[in-house]
Amino acid sequence: MSDYPRRALVSVSDKSGLGPFAKGLVDLGFEILSTGGTARFLKEQGLQVIDVSEYTEFPEIMGGRVKTLHPRVHGAILGRPDLPDDAEAIREHGIIPFELVVVNLYPFEQTIAKPDVSIPEAIEQIDIGGPSMVRSSAKNHAYVGIVTNPEQYEPVLNALQEGSLPLELRRQLAASAFEATARYDRAISDYFTTLEDDASEFPKSLSLQFEKKSDLRYGENPHQSAAVYLESNPPAASIASSVQLHGKELSYNNYLDLDAALSIALEFEQPASVVIKHTNPCGCAVGEDLASAFDKAYAGDPVSAFGSILGFNRELDLATAEMLAEPGRFIEAIIAPGYSPEALEVLRTKPKWKNNVRILACEGFREPSPVSHDYRRLTGGLLVQQRDDRPDPPEDERIVTERAPTEQELVDLRFSWKVCKHVKSNAIVFASQGMIVGVGAGQMSRLDSSMIAAHKAGERSQGAVVASDAFFPFRDGVDEAAKAGVTAVIQPGGSRNDEQVIEACNEHGMAMIFTGHRHFKH
């Protein structure tokens, strides 16, 4: 047994879960030292607290900027009582070692994420004493347990109730502590980089921080190991912020397909449904209600839809769930803003695949998302770009043919254009009456994609429209669409052969719109 009383230093910004945790420490015989707002919070919980200034015999100064930067605090953290020199310094200076240090840092990242935050406001949220105590404790983890996250309260308290923190747990806590300070410093560095006169949207150095959610059974193929990592502050509508309500664990490919389904579902204001296979939409539609949207989306390519991933932009209701559960369908996963209790019950109990289907709820569909970036790994490097989520305002459209689109063609052109941006290049999308009827994706030539889309559409291409994610380099793609019965085209324009393509449309009596920008998706 130690000759010193059990002491914990507690100084946190995030006070969630702190009251029960601190009470648990007191029940185990710990004395609690604390500062400022944390001390007040604990006293309000009815706990006895020793102010750090009482222990150091030095007051908090400069508005609380200086309070824990004191030898008696850091000596109590860094001291090694079983080393003669450290033990002598401890006795000489009246230091009582801490068994536990509980610290989380000022909310710098949350502060700078607020709109119109001023530089002085941001600077005041740069923690100095906190990171010093965290790093000191992590360095001396052989003697001190460092707790930096409310999620650690329960395992730490459970271990202490068994006696003391085992070395393996203290090492885990130390690793988490160094991760926390590294991320904190990187956030501050990135922020100051943006203040430079020649600041770029992209910092001079890039350090990405993601938290591991889980290991996966395997990656794209069984011989590849894999894991999923999530951002700490993901957009409101994202796979990272979704909740799995039912089904088997998600696979690597499930995550990719669900992300694709969610991205397309977010494009539409009307009730919409999307059917994904291998990250491409084989079906997508809008309707008066969710059930009609799904019926049209699934009909887009019923053969490819077997074993698909479904996305919806409305709470999934009973009528839609009953349609999903019809015999002959097989669905791998579903993502929607929510589910009615009746719909969830049907999906969990009725289909043959009921035990396996992954059901995810993702709220926040209508909440604005911050500007975000896409990352693509290279051998020895990384590509970073803004996400392709810019709006496509109607005022950017330009009719370039003799004939203007009819009202229905215009509705379908805008629908197909929204879908097209999510299809792998070279992307060709045939649409009619608010639904996809044929898709050509990922081909080496735009003509091949046009032929595939026409084949998928069959007779449904009569009177349909076509969207192309980039310009038609030659008229052959338009000729192929016209042969299939397509009557209107939407594309970026910008080819040196634009006049030939426009001439082809006029020959076929087709209407064509130039959008002025492309949507490549490699």
Image: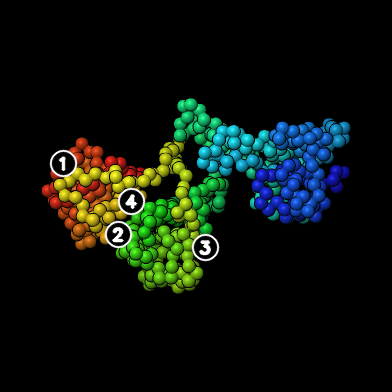
Which residue type does callout 1 highlight?
Gln
Which residue type does callout 4 highlight?
Lys
Instruction: Please give the label number shown on residue 245.
Output: 3
**For the point 21% across and 45% down, which residue is it?**
399
Q: Which residue is mark 4?
A: 418
| Structural distance between the alpha carbons of marks 3 and 4 | 29 Å
**Kind of element beneath mark 2:** strand
Q: Is residue 384 above or below residue 284?
A: above
Dot 2 or dot 1, earlier in sequence: 2
| Structural distance between the alpha carbons of marks 1 and 4 | 26 Å
| Structural distance between the alpha carbons of marks 2 and 3 | 29 Å
Which residue type does callout 2 highlight?
Met
**219 sits to left or right of 391:** right
**461 sits to left or right of 153:** left
**For the point 27% across and 45% down, which residue is it?**
397
Q: Which residue is mark 2?
A: 435
Of residues 147 and 109, the one nearer the viewer is 109
The residue furthest top is: 197
Which residue type does callout 3 highlight?
Leu
Number of disc labels:
4
